[in-house]
Image: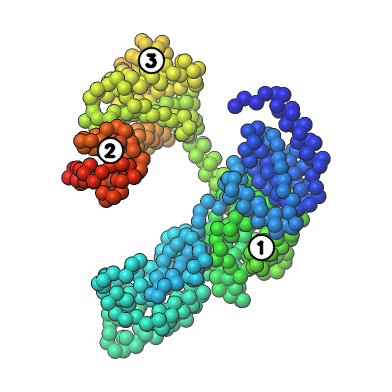
Amino acid sequence: MIEHPEDFEKAKESIRNKLALLPDQPGCYLMKNSEGTIIYVGKAKVLKNRVRSYFTGSHDGKTQRLVSDIRDFEYIVTASNMEALILECNLIKEHYPRYNVLLKDDKTYPYLKITNDKHPRLEVTRRVLKDKAKYFGPYPHAFAAQQTKKLLDRLYPLRKCVTIPSQACLYYHMGQCLGPCIEEVTAEQNASMIEEITRFLNGGHEEIKQELQQKMGEAAEALEFERAKELRDQIISIDALMEKQNITTVDQMNRDVFGYAVDKGWMSVQILYMRQGKMIQRNSSTFPYYGNAYDDFMTFVSQYYSENTALPREIYLPDGELDPAHDGTEESAADALEAWLKVKVHVPKRGSKTKIVSMAMENARIALDEKFKLIERDEERSIKAVENLGQWIGLETVRRIEAFDNSNIQGTDPVSAMVVFIDGKPARKEYRKYKVKTVVGPDDYGTMREVIRRRYERVLKENLPMPDLVVVDGGKGQISAAVDVLENELGLYIPVCGLVKDDKHRTAQLMVGDPPEVIPMRRDSQEFYLLQRIQDEVHRFAITFHRETRAKSMVTSKLDSIPGIGEKRRKALLKHFGSLKKIKEASVEDFRPLSIGEKLATQIIQALQEES
């Protein structure tokens, strides 16, 4: 939507008037764009100072982008910093503002859970509920949680099945379940195992390892070598999982240590998980930020704990001195977080605690440096590949490449797809899908002609950007079909090249020219790798579209073949049940809301089951 200059001036005047009325109290502010959509939510110890700072002075590129979109704002005064922290967290969850959304902790972290059942289960979950179960974590990724569970399943044979079956399963025969399905398992047995698992996860694995070593020795003395080998394997698993860490503290406290780094409008946050005084895992998040660095860092922390409620005993935070807009408010931010979470929050200034925070800060800085180096490396490679490709084809530049691929199975449901690469990188917003309209049967050349015609008629009509190079999937025939339409029908002289696959369906050759000839390009060159990426991407896009189209077509044909089912009833059935599979699995009673009687419902179910 194009904004009128008069509306822009009115918005600026309104903002100036509102800024003069801002209170010097804590609260939250909500920035809005020209459509009235909330695009950013922030919190402030003093609303007057913080909100005014957006409209005065200079900002970096990302913050300037935010400010340029602001046409209005509103604010909510709170009684304290803690209330502002909680309110900000809730508002972001409710509105998902564009400039906040990547600050949101979009991963729900995995936990180990011991269920509160008569016969408890150990499971990995991403939801922490108030269900009287025991939760341990969070783990930075599912693999770490699953590996820990796998070890504990071998050590402690809690119930494995979600629903207790009528007969013993494989876990029982492997000795990893006590088998409450066939044997009496007492509450004392379950309580003992839960106590052992809790001890293990709270750092008691060294004691448990010593007990296993003792049992292994006893088994060896009794000549029970298989049992001794099993115990030895369990000890090895504990050593592998709980490898001794370099970072330890004397107090054996469970704590989370945060560090962050900012550069070029990006923020990296590192969380070091310390359990029983040992650093056991770390988590890394990198995202763009748009406001005050320390404020946005604290927003990340508050959102992290709003989703991860299994809290440590302590939280360590860095001070805000690395932030150019540092205003010394980190102590009050820590106090607010502490009051909200009911957990001790420290901002260490000296001593051994600052060393741990410094480690988190250094890891954050390294993660951010790596990100930029990878971006630079990819950009350098892409630019070089584009330059070299242009030289091979005889063009000064091939900044914009549009590639096409057709997909059909024995001529059914033919479709085509186009992908766009700009400066060697995919521009996914410009991808297009085509249902072939004029071609019947497996005619690849005819399909190519239709799609090229439709694409570039629209480019001419709507004055869209012209590509520097058109890439088609195939050899001489496909190239000739595309060139004929472009030059003889549309009067466009765009270079066209073809990508020919080998018998293993891999990109093998580049063909270009009139008549088309093979370009002797090295297969290990960056430009050849770029062509492979383009061909793989357009093929993936076309195949995905074809599968979607074919699946819809098959559903339609299966239902249409049943007597008594017309277009209206077919649509009603799919809307009500959601899929062909659910229709097939439904009971006769499930069809009554659609005014379908027992006779027709039975025919539908039987017809679908017979076909499958």
Structural crowding at the residue carrying mark 2, measured as other residues with C-alpha within 10 Å and reported as few (<14), some (14–19) or many (≥20): some
Please state the horizontal and vertical placement of residue 430, each as a whole percent of the image.
46, 29
Disc with the residue nearer the chain's start (2 vs 3): 3
Q: Are marks 3 and 1 in contact (CB under 8 Å)?
A: no
- Work out how far the residue at label 2 is from the one at label 1, CA to CA, in angstroms: 53 Å
Q: Amino acid at mark 3?
A: Leu
CA–CA distance in space, label 3 to label 1 = 66 Å
Quickly name the residue at label 1: 340
Of discs 3 and 1, which sits in the foreground?
A: 1
Report x, y in % for residue 204.
49, 78
- Neighbour class for label 1 at 10 Å: few (<14), some, many (≥20)? some
Q: Identify the residue under disc 2.
A: 555
Residue in the image at 73% along x and 41% along y:
54
User: Mark 2 against mark 1, which lies toward the viewer?
Assistant: 2
Q: Which mark is residue 486?
A: 3
In the rendered image, the vertical position of residue 258 relative to residue 507, given as above or below: below
Of residues 537 and 610, the one nearer the viewer is 610
Q: Which of the two labelled residues, at mark 3 and mark 1, occupies the earlier sequence position?
A: 1
Q: Secondary structure at mark 1?
A: helix
